[in-house]
Image (cartoon, rainbow, N blue to C red):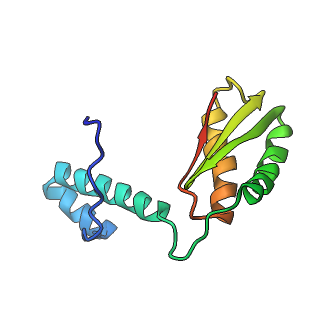
Amino acid sequence: MSAATPPAKLDAPFYTEGELDALEQTHPVEALRIAREQAQLARRLAAQAPAGAALPTLEEARAVLEEARQILLRDGGDLELVGLEGSVLTVRLKGACAGCPRAALDLRQVVEALVRRRYPALREVRNVF
């Protein structure tokens, strides 16, 4: 696998499930490649911020992280705001979250989900140790 990610092909046609199923009968490798490309493209498009979406201020980010923190505290975890640089919010998972095998999952499904629901212009929530 190469280190650089190729640019997204935003003009690529999307095949329906039926079309992919039909292609799979004759060209299974090609159908798998197309399905993977479509899934990657769909994720990239979903990650793009809607036009006009505003980035939060540091205080607004702190407020939404407090909501995520309350959820993590229920299981003994904790969360600290480290910084906000452009469209990347940096946090530090603490408490039971530090070293927990589920920490990456909680970061994405709890913290990032809450933050991006409120502020879709944020592209990433990153944990630092």
For image coordinates 43% across by 58% down, the residue present is: 43
For image coordinates 62% across by 39% down, the residue present is: 105
Q: Is residue 45 left or right of residue 122?
A: left
In the displayed structure, 56 sits above or below 104; it is below
Q: Is residue 20 left or right of residue 128?
A: left
Farthest residue to the top: give it.
99
Q: Quadrant of residue 35?
A: bottom left
Counting from the top left corner in percent of width and height, residue 125 is at: 60, 47
Q: Quadrant of the C terminus?
A: top right
In the displayed structure, 118 sits above or below 64; it is below
Q: Nearer the viewer, residue 10 or 30?
A: 10
Counting from the top left corner in percent of width and height, residue 78 is at: 80, 35
Q: Nearer the viewer, residue 120 or 27?
A: 120
Q: Quadrant of the N terminus?
A: top left
Q: Nearer the viewer, residue 102 or 66?
A: 66
Q: Is residue 33 left or right of residue 70?
A: left
Q: Quadrant of residue 96?
A: top right
For image coordinates 79% across by 33% down, the residue present is: 77
Q: Nearer the viewer, residue 18 or 89?
A: 89
Counting from the top left corner in percent of width and height, residue 110 is at: 69, 48
